[in-house]
């Protein structure tokens, strides 16, 4: 099978768009097509230049990394801005993931949806992109739970019960109640502790 596949026949008689497969994208990385530090995402086979991460977003990622590392201990691996392979044409890099523990710490392969216990996206400049593009993509691939931390609105959105059309349960918890990832119910804390 070709690494580049047509998505559909162009109705306008123009060029037919193609989608880049995960394997082809990995070969491009290995061949040095992208410069060190290039922020490139691949969603549904299309390459996207990602905006730079501002200080508030980077600080939130660091805070979440420290917070969840302390809470989950050996129950999960905390991954910060690592690729999540969504077969066969997407490989987003969520801001944070809690992954099933694995002896190799995912050195042989990137995690897949079945490895993800929780995916977290931090949204400021990406506030339209994350809920409209990435979160439905996670749901369609069976990521069990995704949280969106809205830095602008200072709130959290919890997405659960994934399906092909999106998440069927969306929660908007207040800052005071206790919350826990579905697959790590013993890791309970107040929403306010996330510093949102």
Image: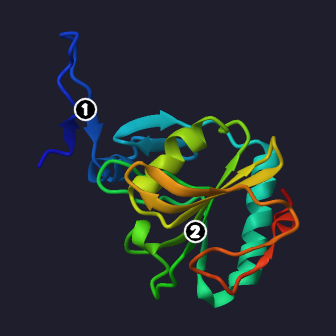
**Residue nearest the observer in this picture, 175 or 37:** 175
Q: Is residue 95 left or right of residue 141?
A: right
Q: Is residue 160 left or right of residue 115?
A: right
Whole-percent x, y for residue 98 in the image = 59, 72
The mark nearer the N terminus, 1 or 2, is 1
Q: Is residue 97 left or right of residue 191?
A: left
Instruction: Please tell me in which quadrant of the rendered image residue 80 appears.
Output: bottom right
Q: Label 1: which residue? A: 18
Q: Secondary structure under badge 1?
A: strand
Whole-percent x, y for residue 171 in the image = 67, 58
Whole-percent x, y for residue 87 in the image = 31, 56
**Residue nearest the observer in this picture, 109 or 113:** 113
Residue at the location (74% across, 55% down)? 156
Pointer 2 local density, CA inside 10 Å: few below 14, some 14–19, many at least 20: many
Residue at the location (75% across, 80% down)? 188
Q: Nearer the viewer, mark 1 or mark 2?
A: 2
Pointer 1 local density, CA inside 10 Å: few below 14, some 14–19, many at least 20: some
Residue at the location (69% across, 87% down)? 186
Q: Is residue 38 above or below residue 189?
A: above
Residue at the location (54% across, 61% down)? 82
Q: Label 2: which residue? A: 118
Q: Is residue 120 above or below residue 74?
A: above
Whole-percent x, y for residue 85 in the image = 40, 59
Residue at the extreme left = 1
Residue at the extreme front = 168
Alpha carbon of mark 1 to alpha carbon of mark 2: how far?
Answer: 31 Å
**Which dot marks residue 116?**
none
Q: Secondary structure under badge 2?
A: strand
């Amino acid at each position: 099978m070709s690494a580049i596949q047509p998505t559909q026949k162009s109705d306008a008689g123009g060029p037919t768009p193609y989608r880049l497969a995960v394997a082809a994208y990995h070969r491009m990385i290995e061949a040095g097509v992208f410069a060190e530090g290039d922020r490139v995402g691949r969603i549904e086979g299309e390459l996207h230049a990602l905006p730079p991460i501002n200080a508030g977003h980077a600080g939130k990622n660091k805070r979440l990394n420290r917070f969840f590392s302390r809470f989950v201990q050996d129950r999960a691996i905390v991954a910060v801005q690592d690729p999540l392979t969504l077969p066969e044409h997407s490989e987003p890099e969520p801001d944070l993931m809690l992954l099933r523990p694995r002896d190799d710490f995912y050195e042989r392969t990137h995690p897949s949806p079945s490895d993800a216990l929780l995916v977290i996206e931090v949204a400021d400049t990406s506030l339209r992109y994350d809920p409209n593009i990435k979160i439905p993509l996670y749901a369609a691939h069976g990521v069990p739970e995704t949280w969106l931390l809205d830095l602008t609105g200072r709130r959290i959105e919890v997405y659960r019960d994934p399906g092909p059309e999106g998440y069927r349960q969306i929660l908007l918890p207040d800052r005071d109640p206790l919350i826990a990832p579905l697959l790590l119910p013993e890791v309970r804390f107040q929403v306010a502790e996330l510093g949102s």
